[in-house]
Image (cartoon, coloured by chain):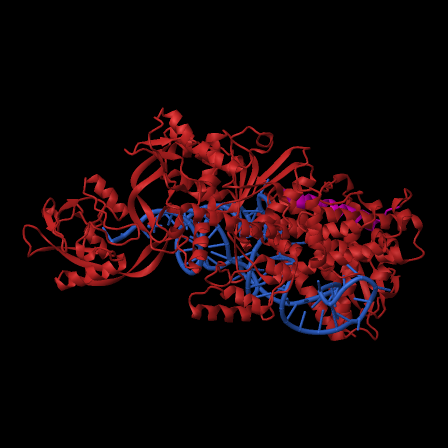
RNA sequence: GGGUGUUUAGCUCAGUUGGGAGAGCGACGGCCUUACAAGCCGUAGGUCGCAGGUUCGACCCCUGCAACACCCACCA
């Protein structure tokens, strides 16, 4: 028999599945659909993806096997900013600037790059076993989706929900584009708080002292604000100061926004370069002076001396000049939150510019209601808080980006700046009845990437056309995604879909945890602790891993640290574990916590589990292959062991089904793991050996066991298939057709359904008893250091009639499991030999000590048991001695305690007798 | 500043209507027993973060506190 080797089986099966179109909706049964959160088309698979898509694939395969008309819609996102950045960097390596190429040529380069790298992520998803419907794969920039984008933009504009306006927006000076609030990340950084003196206009000898973290913006100050209740400054309100370094006089205004406690209580106001100052500027009708270019250099609105300086150079210059004038009072250290562009890491500037916005509140209201009403349910429930917090305080969405890669905004301007919006220039001319000679130019901006992905669930199904796919598969059933994307994407899908389709995009939102490394650290390129899921599947040498993690590192010191940590954590690199073990690990760690630690030890454990299942199947086939007659015979007799494992299978099936219905992948994985390993392998297979191997076994019983073994093995493979697709397919195909369906694939076979009629409590009680007897002997052997090979005499005493019946019924099983030299019953009058003993409920089990047992060891073992039992007894007796317990607790609980006490007392008595007799030796 | 989550064995985590604390890994001891040493058998190890409260009874419900993590908003 060959060994379990995932590399040898996994890829071939995927190719076969795909070639046979097994991923396509069956066209039969109730629809079940999930839209993939579209990965960046030029991206590569990271651990978060692998985790997320593994979860979805299990759901999809589960539903498909249950007979649903199942669609997992594939597609990719054009990812405006990051894709444009990647291509720009590539060009930079060839010393080409995008500007040199021009817009058209640049966009063409991006398409080239997409063609070249767009397959990477698709191939990686295939390696994961993802049963995506590739045939209808979409791309946010393809023709159909672009049409949906146009449609939505034009309709929203015509309804007055999209507008163009001059607003203060987050500006990334490196990319030279606006970005949304959600694309700005603020982190605390060490900085300074500078205190300046601003001379009063009426009395230049006196000053107001303002404190700022951004000295250079003083060139754009148009007011100084104090709190109207501040006694220190009340008398100055309405006066003016002279703004140093410029010749401007600016007013001292009063506003409650100013915190008297902070700094000096005086705030310089720069409406063009700070969001709060901008609001204040509007309240007080202040002049707005923009002093920065789109590259964040000082522009012509500032004194000539500073023009052209970068903002940080300008800071230095301003500080030097103020100090020279004696106006710099002091500098304090100060930590402040510095806003940076998520992609570039550049410090973001608030900048006044013309942008397009969605008037979001009218869209948000029904979207909030849909979740409040339960039309959309978040799992776990409390993830709704993130959604509500964002949606209830939502600000208009800036949707224009000053990029070249993306959906061009469908707006045209004439020479006078009039705006015309339509699906094309031709439509615009017709719609607005424009003269043919009128020159129009299209808005150069593109839409925020999230604008197109907001339409994802319905645009991928053919909207704006009313396609059968849209009819069948929308609303989708569930969206599986991370919490980081709730505001960015989930909320916008809900808003747009409700608006344009009139139904929710999905009924449920499953929020999974964030995958971290074994130390709980977020995986990131800069930390060098990231893992490529395929390196776990295929394995990677240490040197290659180090090279991968330290590639493109700007700082050599950081690279050194990463190399050291990597060599320590993976001294032998990573071995090739295969896809199934990796997937099973994801299910096992997918609990309800916010972060899930990824530990290679777990993968190893589940690789071992796969190996276990492989070997169990090998064993099974030894008794299945070539036994067609036995396997198809009708004349069979099932033993209690068969009935027990069949019963257990109903339990595990019910547990897995419940877990899947409640999205508890961890519990599903656990149930399967425990059934396969602890019940099927450790007990059933062991118990079936004597029956199958013993030539004296009656034929009907042998056939019964053979059929049960085949049946449970085959069913278990189906039960586990959503989680271990490759391994289960391989093993299932190895089974003879007489014990399975004659099919090319397990993928489309029926998922097991728990059948309560097959639950057999009698058989369960039998096997529970049998396990206790076997465990009691094993415990004695283990503790007494008796070799498993050595046969020992075993005696029973004090058993009930049922115990006697069971000993008889399971005699041959017991013989093979506990290797007794002989098994005998002691009568009530027989003298008990000195022995190591075990207790199975009322029945005593004795292993005589002569030549076998060490007295001291046996005493220690008995003492341990005595101590444990008497602790239990004390607790139980204590409870029953408490009158309020007896009075107030439910009768059945009280009775249970009483029964327990009786049991414990009898057990204690027996143990004590045994101890006494051993001690007296 | 506001909010959410976490705290259970050495490590990582389960514990689903409050009724005798579990798993995997690791540790220790013994086994090449004819599916599997990627295995088998046995053993040890926990005041369930701390302090109160409710209850006959709390890992579980309530209050407060602490530590850690994350999210949102940011005082120039």
Quarter the N terminus of chain A occupies: bottom right
Q: Report whether residue A540 is seen.
A: yes
Residue A593 rendering spot, x and y as whole percentages: 52, 51
In this rendering, position of residue A373 left or right of residue A301: right
Residue A38 rendering spot, x and y as whole percentages: 53, 45
Rendered view: A918 above or below A7: below
Q: Nearer the viewer, residue A431 or A904?
A: A431
Residues in magenta, as a range: A637-660
Q: Looking at this rendering, what residue extends furthest in the front direction? A: A437
Q: For the point 32% across and 45% down, which residue is it?
A: A169
In this rendering, position of residue A207 left or right of residue B56: left
Rendered view: A370 above or below B3: above
Q: Colour of chain B?
A: blue
Total numbered labels? 0
In this rendering, position of residue A217 left or right of residue A474: left
Q: For the point 69% across and 64% down, which residue is it?
A: A866
The reply to whether the magenta stretch includes residue A850 is: no
| Most frequent secondary structure within the magenta stretch | helix
Q: Colour of chain A?
A: red
Quarter the C terminus of chain A occupies: bottom right
Q: Report whether residue A372 is seen.
A: no
Residue A180 rendering spot, x and y as whole percentages: 38, 45
Picture quadrant of residue A287: top left
Rendered view: A262 above or below A783: above
Residue A107 rendering spot, x and y as whole percentages: 45, 47
The reply to whether the magenta stretch includes residue A656 is: yes
């Amino acid at each position: 028999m060959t060994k379990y080797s995932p590399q040898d089986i996994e890829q071939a099966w995927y190719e076969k599945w795909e070639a046979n179109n097994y991923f396509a909706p069956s066209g039969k049964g109730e629809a079940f659909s999930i839209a993939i959160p579209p990965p960046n088309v030029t991206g590569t698979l990271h651990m978060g993806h692998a985790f997320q898509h593994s979860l979805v694939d299990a759901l999809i395969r589960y539903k498909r096997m249950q007979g649903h008309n199942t669609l997992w819609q594939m597609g990719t996102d054009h990812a405006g900013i990051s894709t444009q950045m990647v291509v720009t960097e590539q060009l930079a390596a060839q010393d080409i600037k995008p500007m040199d190429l021009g817009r058209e040529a640049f966009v063409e380069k991006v398409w080239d790059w997409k063609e070249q790298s767009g397959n990477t992520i698709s191939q990686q998803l295939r390696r994961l076993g993802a049963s995506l419907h590739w045939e209808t794969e979409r791309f946010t920039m393809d023709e159909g989706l672009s049409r949906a984008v146009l449609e939505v933009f034009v309709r929203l504009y015509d309804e007055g929900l999209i507008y163009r306006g001059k607003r203060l927006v987050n500006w990334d000076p490196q990319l030279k584009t606006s970005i949304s609030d959600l694309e700005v990340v603020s982190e605390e950084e060490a900085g300074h708080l500078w205190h300046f003196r601003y001379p009063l206009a009426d009395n230049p000898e006196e000053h107001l002292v303002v404190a700022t973290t951004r000295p250079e913006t003083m060139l754009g100050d148009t007011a100084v604000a104090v709190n109207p209740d501040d006694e220190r400054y009340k008398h100055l309100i309405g006066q003016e100061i002279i703004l140093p370094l410029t010749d401007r006089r600016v007013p001292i205004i009063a506003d409650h926004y100013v915190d008297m406690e902070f700094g000096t209580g005086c705030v310089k106001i720069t409406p063009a370069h700070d969001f709060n100052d901008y609001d204040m500027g509007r309240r007080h009708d202040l002049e707005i002076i923009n002093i920065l270019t789109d590259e964040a250099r000082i522009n012509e609105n500032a004194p000539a001396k500073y023009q052209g300086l970068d903002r940080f150079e300008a800071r230095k210059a301003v500080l030097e000049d103020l100090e020279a004038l004696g106006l710099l009072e002091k500098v304090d250290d100060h930590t402040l939150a510095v806003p940076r562009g998520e992609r570039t890491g550049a410090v973001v500037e608030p900048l006044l510019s013309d942008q397009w916005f969605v008037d979001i509140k009218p869209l948000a209201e029904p979207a909030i209601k849909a979740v409040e009403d339960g039309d959309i349910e978040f799992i776990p429930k409390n993830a709704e808080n993130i959604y509500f917090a964002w949606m209830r305080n939502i600000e208009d969405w800036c949707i224009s980006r000053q990029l070249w890669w993306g959906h061009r905004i469908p707006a045209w301007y004439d020479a006078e700046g009039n705006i015309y919006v339509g699906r094309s220039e031709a439509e615009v001319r017709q719609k607005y009845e424009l003269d043919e000679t009128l020159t129009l130019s299209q808005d150069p901006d593109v839409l925020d990437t999230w604008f197109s992905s907001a339409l994802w669930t319905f645009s991928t199904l053919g909207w704006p056309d009313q396609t059968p796919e849209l009819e069948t598969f929308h609303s989708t059933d569930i969206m599986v995604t991370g919490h980081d994307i709730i505001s960015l994407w989930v909320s916008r899908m809900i808003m747009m879909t409700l608006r344009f389709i009139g139904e929710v995009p999905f009924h449920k939102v499953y929020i999974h945890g964030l995958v971290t490394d074994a130390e709980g650290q977020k995986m990131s390129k800069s930390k060098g602790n990231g893992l490529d899921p395929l390196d776990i599947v295929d394995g990677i040498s240490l040197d290659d891993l180090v090279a991968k993690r330290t590639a493109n590192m700007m700082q050599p010191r950081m690279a050194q640290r990463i190399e050291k940590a990597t060599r320590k954590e993976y001294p032998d690199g990573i071995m090739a574990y295969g896809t199934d073990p990796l997937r099973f690990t994801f299910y096992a760690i997918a609990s309800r916590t916010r972060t899930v630690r990824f530990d290679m030890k777990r993968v190893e454990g589940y690789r071992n589990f796969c190996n276990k299942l492989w070997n169990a199947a090998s064993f099974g086939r030894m008794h299945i292959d070539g036994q067609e007659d036995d396997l198809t015979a009708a004349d069979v007799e099932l033993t209690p062991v068969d009935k027990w494992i069949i019963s257990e299978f109903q339990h595990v099936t019910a547990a897995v089904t419940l877990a899947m219905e409640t999205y508890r992948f961890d519990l599903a994985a656990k149930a399967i793991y425990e059934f396969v390993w602890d019940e099927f392998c450790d007990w059933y297979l062991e118990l079936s050996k004597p029956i199958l191997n013993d030539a004296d076994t009656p034929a009907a019983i042998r056939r019964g066991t053979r059929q049960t073994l085949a049946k449970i093995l085959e069913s278990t493979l189906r039960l586990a298939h959503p989680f271990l697709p490759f391994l289960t397919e391989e093993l299932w195909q190895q089974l003879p057709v007489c014990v399975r369906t004659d099919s090319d694939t397990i993928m489309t076979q029926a998922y097991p359904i728990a059948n309560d009629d097959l639950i057999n409590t009698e058989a369960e009680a039998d096997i529970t008893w049998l396990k206790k007897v076997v465990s009691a002997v094993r415990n004695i052997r283990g503790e007494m250091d008796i070799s498993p090979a050595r046969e020992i005499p075993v005696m029973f005493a004090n058993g009930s009639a049922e115990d006697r019946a069971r000993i008889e019924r399971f005699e041959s099983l017991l013989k093979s499991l506990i290797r007794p030299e002989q098994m005998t019953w002691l009568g009530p009058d027989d003298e008990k030999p000195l022995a190591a003993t075990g207790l199975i409920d009322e029945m005593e089990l004795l292993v005589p000590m002569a030549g076998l047992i060490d007295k001291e060891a046996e005493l220690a073992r008995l003492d341990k048991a005595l101590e444990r039992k008497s602790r239990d007894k004390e607790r139980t007796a204590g409870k029953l001695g408490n009158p309020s317990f007896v009075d107030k607790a439910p009768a059945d609980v009280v009775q249970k305690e009483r029964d327990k006490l009786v049991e414990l007392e009898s057990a204690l008595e027996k143990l004590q007798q045994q101890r006494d007799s051993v001690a007296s030796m």
